[in-house]
Image (tube, rainbow, N blue to C red):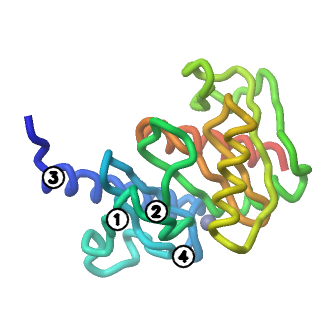
């Protein structure tokens, strides 16, 4: 059965618009960066950095469709080859709480056990929800390709996580679905709020 590309594209674009509006209203993404992208087998649906539905004219038309085979196009917009297999979405935040949390903690791995704010955080190794959390914290690198390499390395070294926090930048959370990525990103943002 062939997939109706136009119908699928319309749905994906609308999801990106709806989610970016909510995240912007909560201060998790800003006009300077952060966003959500959805990957299919061939295509990446994304709003270029700074694009947020609700403050754009013709907002649906502003959503780009790129190829997953192409080089990095826009790291903050989510247009790059994902560093984890079998993920279909990324939610990337640029929040004040993420920045302050990263300031307070060292580069390495933040670990917490039995925290109540982890119910939407997934363990990549077991594909189950966590009780404990291991969040890699890495340093910001101004070159986007170098930063993407650093993010790949963090996931390679931390097989249980879907999320990585970049100092002076923000959180990248991947998911097998956009719902999972969004839920986990929001769970981490809650955790940041209570640990700064
Ligand atoms: Zn960013």
As helix, strand or loop, the secondary structure at mark 1 comes to strand
Q: Which sits earlier in the primary sequence, circle 3 or circle 1? A: 3
Q: Are marks 1 and 2 in contact (CB under 8 Å)?
A: yes
Q: Along the polypeptide, which appears first: circle 1 or circle 2?
A: 1
Indicate the secondary structure of the residue bearing disc 4.
Answer: loop
Along the polypeptide, which appears first: circle 2 or circle 4? 4
Q: How many marks?
A: 4
Q: Quadrant of residue 159?
A: top right
Kindly report which numbered mark, 4 or 1, lies closer to the viewer in this rendering. Answer: 1
Q: Which mark is residue 5?
A: 3
Seen in the image, is 16 located left or right of residue 92? left
First in residue order: circle 3 vs circle 2: 3
Assess disc 2: are there few (<14), some (14-19) or many (≥20) residues with their C-alpha within 10 Å of its C-alpha.
many
Residue topped by disc 1: 66
Label 1 residue near ligand 1, CB within 8 Å? no
Confirm or deny contact between disc 4 and disc 3 (CB under 8 A): no
Q: Earlier in the sequence, mark 4 or mark 3?
A: 3
Residue 3's x, y, as percent?
13, 43
Residue at x 57% of width, y 70% of height: 33
Q: Residues within 10 Å of mark 4 (few under 14, many from 20)?
A: few
Q: Which residue is mark 2?
A: 79
| Left or right: 167, with 10 as reference point | right
Residue 168 place in picture, x, y as percent = 78, 66
Compared to residue 17, the image places residue 4 above or below, namely: above
Quadrant of the snapshot with the N terminus: top left
Which residue position is annotated with label 4?
Answer: 31
The secondary structure type at the circle numbered 2 is loop
- Label drawn at residue 187: none
């Amino acid at each position: 059965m062939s997939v109706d590309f136009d119908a699928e594209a319309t749905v994906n674009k609308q999801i990106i618009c709806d989610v970016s509006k909510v995240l912007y209203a909560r201060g998790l993404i800003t006009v300077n960066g952060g966003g959500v992208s959805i990957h299919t087998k061939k295509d990446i649906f994304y709003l270029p950095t700074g694009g947020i539905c609700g403050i754009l004219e013709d907002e649906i038309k502003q959503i780009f469709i790129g190829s997953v085979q192409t080089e990095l196009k826009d790291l903050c917009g989510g247009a790059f080859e994902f560093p984890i297999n079998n993920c279909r979405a990324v939610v990337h935040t640029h929040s004040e709480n993420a920045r302050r949390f990263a300031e307070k903690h060292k580069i390495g791995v933040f670990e917490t056990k039995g925290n109540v704010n982890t119910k939407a955080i997934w363990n990549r190794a077991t594909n189950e929800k966590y009780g404990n959390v291991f969040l890699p914290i890495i340093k910001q690198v101004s070159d986007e390709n170098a930063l993407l390499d650093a993010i790949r390395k963090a996931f390679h070294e931390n097989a249980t996580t879907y999320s990585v926090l970049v100092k002076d930048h923000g959180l990248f959370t991947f998911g097998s679905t956009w719902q999972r990525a969004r839920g986990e990103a929001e769970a981490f943002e809650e955790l940041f709020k209570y640990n700064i």
